[in-house]
């Protein structure tokens, strides 16, 4: 499953606001294992003068300021304080720190414990931490922190539910830190507003029929969400198609053009595309099946496969072969003057104007001027961004701006699901492992 992180769509800078995590909760707070980095080299360093501890090295635990782990010739090579240690490939190293600012791994900082290992020909770093600390970053990674509190709270409950449902499914981690699970960017994505959203919804999850729901979400639906059975194998009672409130999303309406050479590369079986015939659509209007006609023959694709092959933002799309166009050549710059204008030189203003992007093809954002060039192109007109199932993040923002609280937002997108404190029996995968574990509450 794939999510589109809104931070990327908005172009919002992630604000660094470092503070100690919340106090240790009462009861047993679930722990998450998040795969945060893979590669042939892992570089760690302390934040400031406070050292971190590495366990699993020969001779016992070591207190370090910097630590590099490499994969070399099937073995692990640890570099610390000018010393190199060769470790068995099966080694598991655990890195912890009492520093509330976390530990640097590459370009990001993480709370909790980092578990380093070498499996499958590459190094892996798994961040193990309490779910509430994990969510403080997830909310800020998935949504702009300036959004209304109710939208951030809805994201916190949905993300908590999804994360808990993914726990204890086997393997060395529960979730990835990318859009293949839900985006987690470490300490730098925490802000006062994301911490407040998590703390004010502490332990709350979405439950249907006594079990955690599959709380999927996406960026923007384009006006109407999709039923789960139209995208995946099962139709879940709480994931039905509902009207959305994402009209202000930059992806509510969009257009994309594909030239014939690009289509040939993406669809070598047909040698490109001469026409796209949509054979069936879902009740929400999304493409369910389409036939592509090309110079070398035809190809039958599902809507999901078509989206993947063309790299489309959604399947709520229509197709048209049109005369090829290209952006119009830039207009000549006016004559420069040396005098400053409103605090900046005329040259600086013109440079900024040239460097800024031209208006997009999206409705409501202006239309880019184009001129006709020889040949044909495939014009795709679409709505929304993502699979369209479950909560629309831009729709949650829209409802919050209308005054809805987080419970109202969640009940709109997850029909029939209840918001309640998590109990182990809500998840059959962990119920037996926690026979008497209490719910955790602040």
Image (cartoon, grey):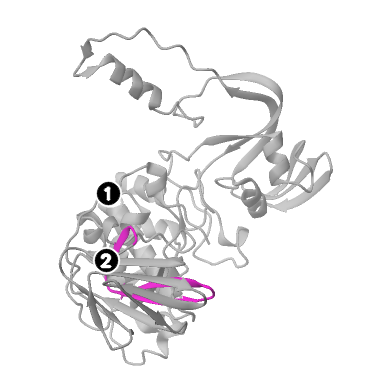
Q: In the image, which is nearer the foreground, mark 1 or mark 2?
A: 2
Q: Disc 1 vs disc 2: Cβ atoms closer than 8 Å?
A: no
> Observer-nearest residue: 287 or 62?
62
Query: Of callouts 1 and 2, which one flags the residue occurring earlier in the amino acid sequence?
Result: 2
Depth check: 373 or 70 in front?
70
Splitting the image into 4 quarters, where does residue 257 fall? top right
| Magenta-drawn stretch contains 150 | no
Per the image, label 2 sits on a secondary structure element best described as strand
- Which of 192 and 223 lies nearest the eye of the viewer? 192
For residue 316, side relative to residue 78 (left or right): right
Q: Does residue 86 sit above or below 396 in this rendering?
A: below
**Residue 306, how many percent across, how many down?**
67, 49
User: In the image, which disc is placed on residue 148?
Assistant: 1
Q: Residues within 10 Å of mark 1 (few under 14, many from 20)?
A: some
Q: Give the main secondary structure, helix, strand or loop, of the magenta stretch.
A: strand
Residue visible at 64% across and 45% down in the picture: 310
Can you give x and y, in whole percent of width and height, for residue 190 in the image? 26, 58
**154 above or below 394?**
below
At 37% from the left and 83% from the top, the residue drawn is 424
Query: What are the residue bounds of the magenta stretch?
Result: 106-130
Distance, label 1 to label 2, CA atoms, is: 35 Å
**In the figure, residue 187 lies in which quadrant?**
bottom left
Residue 73's place in the image compared with 215, above or below, is below
Above or below residue 226? Residue 368 is above
Mark linked to residue 45? 2
Magenta run includes residue 110: yes
Q: Residue 69 at what x, y percent from top left?
A: 38, 72
Q: How many marks?
A: 2
């Amino acid at each position: 499953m794939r999510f589109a992180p809104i931070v990327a769509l908005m172009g919002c800078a992630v604000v660094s606001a470092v503070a100690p995590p919340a106090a240790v909760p009462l009861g047993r707070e679930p722990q998450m294992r998040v795969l945060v980095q893979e590669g042939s080299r892992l570089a760690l360093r302390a934040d400031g003068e406070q050292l971190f501890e590495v366990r699993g090295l020969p001779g016992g635990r070591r207190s370090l300021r910097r630590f590099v782990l490499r994969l070399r010739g099937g073995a692990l090579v640890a570099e610390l304080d000018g010393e190199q240690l060769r470790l068995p490939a099966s080694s598991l190293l655990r890195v912890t720190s009492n520093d509330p600012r976390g530990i640097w791994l590459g370009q990001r900082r993480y709370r909790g414990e980092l578990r380093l290992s070498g499996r499958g020909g590459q190094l892996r770093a798994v961040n193990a931490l309490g779910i509430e600390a994990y969510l403080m970053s997830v909310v800020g990674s998935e949504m702009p922190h300036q959004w209304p509190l109710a939208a951030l709270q809805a994201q916190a409950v949905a993300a908590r539910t999804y994360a808990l449902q993914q726990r204890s499914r086997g393997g060395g981690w529960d979730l990835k830190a990318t859009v293949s699970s839900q985006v987690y960017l470490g300490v730098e994505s925490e802000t006062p507003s994301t911490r407040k959203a998590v703390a004010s919804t502490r332990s709350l999850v979405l439950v249907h029929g006594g079990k955690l729901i599959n709380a999927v979400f996406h960026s923007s639906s384009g006006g109407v969400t999709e039923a789960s059975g139209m995208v995946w194998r099962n139709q879940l009672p709480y994931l039905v198609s509902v009207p959305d409130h994402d009209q202000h999303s930059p992806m509510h309406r969009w257009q994309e053009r594909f030239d014939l050479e690009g289509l040939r590369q993406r669809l070598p079986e047909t040698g490109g595309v001469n026409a796209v015939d949509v054979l069936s659509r879902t009740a929400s209007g999304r493409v369910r099946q389409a036939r592509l006609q090309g110079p070398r023959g035809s190809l039958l694709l599902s809507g999901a496969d078509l989206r993947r092959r063309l790299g489309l933002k959604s399947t709520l799309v229509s197709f048209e072969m049109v005369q090829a166009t290209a952006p119009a050549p830039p207009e000549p710059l006016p004559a420069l003057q040396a005098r400053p204008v409103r605090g900046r030189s005329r040259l600086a203003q013109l440079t900024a104007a040239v460097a800024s992007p031209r208006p997009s093809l999206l409705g409501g954002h202006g239309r880019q001027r184009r001129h006709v060039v020889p040949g044909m192109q495939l014009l795709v007109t679409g709505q929304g961004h993502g699979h369209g199932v479950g909560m629309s993040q831009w729709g949650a923002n829209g409802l919050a701006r209308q005054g809805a609280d987080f419970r109202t937002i969640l009940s709109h997108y997850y029909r029939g699901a209840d918001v309640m404190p998590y109990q182990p029996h809500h998840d059959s995968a962990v119920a037996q492992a926690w026979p008497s574990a209490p719910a955790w509450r602040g």
